[in-house]
Amino acid sequence: MSKKQDSKAFYDKLREQLQETASWPSEYLYKFIVLSNPNKVQQIESIFDSMGAVINTKQSSNGKYTSVSINVKMKNPDAVIAKYLEVTEKVEGVISL
């Protein structure tokens, strides 16, 4: 399977799980990990700007990585997935959890 096919399968499964486990609109917790670079963290934060998101960051013990947790109310599973895709497209090297 190609990386694109793997990604589509992952998001299809996520969409199904979100539809089954939550009533929408609903709060959703995003978690990302990036190299500790203020620009990368700012890029992620700007994607969720004006959405009323609560954003928390925490550096790893050695300071090399920063985790970014974002709690935000989303309309539906498709909106959740759209934000994941936007972050992975705009922020180089980001890891989505």
Image (cartoon, rainbow, N blue to C red):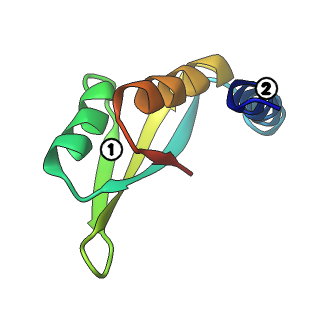
Where residue 1 sits in the image (x, y, percent)?
83, 32
Q: Badge 2 is on which residue?
A: 12
Secondary structure category for the residue under label 1: strand
- Vertical order, 92 against 59 (above or below): above
Amino acid type assigned to the residue bearing label 2 in the image: Asp
Q: Badge 1 is on which residue?
A: 54
Left or right position of 9 against 86: right
Where residue 70 sits in the image (x, y, percent)?
40, 45
Secondary structure category for the residue under label 2: helix
At label 2, counting other C-alpha atoms closer than 10 Å, the crowd grade (few under 14, some 14-19, many 20 or more) is few
Q: Upstream in the sequence, badge 2 or badge 1?
A: 2
- Vertical order, 16 against 93 (above or below): above
Residue at 75 percent of width and 29 percent of height = 2
* Residue 26 quadrant: top right
Where residue 68 sits in the image (x, y, percent)?
36, 52
Q: Residue furthest bottom?
A: 61
Q: Are marks 2 and 1 in contact (CB under 8 Å)?
A: no
Amino acid type assigned to the residue bearing label 1 in the image: Val
Where residue 14 sits in the image (x, y, percent)?
74, 35
Left or right position of 33 against 15: left
Q: How many marks are shown on the rendered structure?
A: 2
Judged by depth in the image, the label closer to the viewer, 2 or 1, is: 2
Residue at 24 percent of width and 59 percent of height = 36
The residues tagged by marks 2 and 1 sit, at their Cα atoms, a distance apart of 26 Å
Left or right position of 21 against 80: right
